[in-house]
């Protein structure tokens, strides 16, 4: 928990969902999106919607099968939508991956979320 507080202080705000999931989110300017607007393209103009790939890396002293993590991952993904990091989680916008990695110490346990624009 101390690591989460340190991350929140260093990188931005600590957001909490109704399911009890919290996420440290880097600060960004008001109205800014995850994807930059291409030169010559107006903000909000019609065109191809951005696509993303999201990778959840679960660090645990007792790794589990990826399908056992899916329920918790869904809540985390919904939190990312609620705070405006990703626009939607339908198949046209998002493709994902869940990876379980072993760690040796309790303080190293947690989830790393990597988001890339396709």
Image (tube, rainbow, N blue to C red):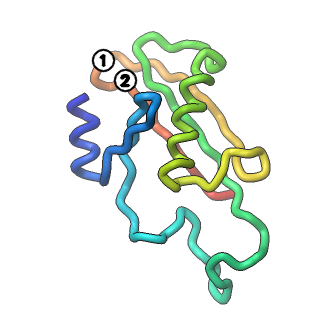
**Residue bearing mark 1:** 106
Identify the residue at horizontal 71%, vertical 43% (top origin).
95
Residue 61, compared with residue 27, is above or below; it is above
Q: Secondary structure at mark 1?
A: helix
Q: Residues within 10 Å of mark 2 (few under 14, many from 20)?
A: some
Identify the residue at horizontal 30%, vertical 17% (top origin).
105
Near-viewer residue (114 or 47):
47
Identify the residue at horizontal 52%, vertical 46% (top origin).
80
Does residue 8 appear left or right of residue 58 in this picture?
Answer: left
Q: If the image is split into quadrants, where does the N terminus sit?
A: top left
Near-viewer residue (111 or 44):
44
Q: If the image is split into quadrants, where does the C terminus sit?
A: bottom right
Where residue 51 sits: x, y (%)? 71, 56
Q: CA distance from mark 2 to mark 1?
A: 5 Å
Does residue 108 appear left or right of residue 70 in this picture?
Answer: left
Contact, mark 2 vs mark 1 (Cβ under 8 Å): yes
Where residue 47 sits: x, y (%)? 78, 73
**Residue bearing mark 2:** 109
Near-viewer residue (53 or 47):
47
């Amino acid at each position: 928990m101390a690591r989460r507080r340190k991350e929140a202080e260093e990188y931005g705000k600590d957001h909490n969902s109704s399911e009890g999931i919290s996420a440290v989110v880097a600060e960004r300017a008001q109205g800014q999106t995850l994807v930059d607007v291409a030169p010559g393209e107006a903000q909000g103009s019609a065109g191809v919607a951005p696509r993303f790939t999201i990778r959840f890396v679960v660090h645990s002293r007792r790794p589990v099968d990826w399908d056992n993590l899916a329920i918790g991952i869904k809540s985390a993904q919904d939190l990312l939508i609620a705070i405006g990091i990703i626009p939607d989680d339908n198949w046209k916008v998002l493709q994902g991956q869940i990876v379980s990695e072993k760690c040796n110490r309790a303080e190293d346990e947690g989830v790393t979320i990597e988001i890339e624009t396709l």
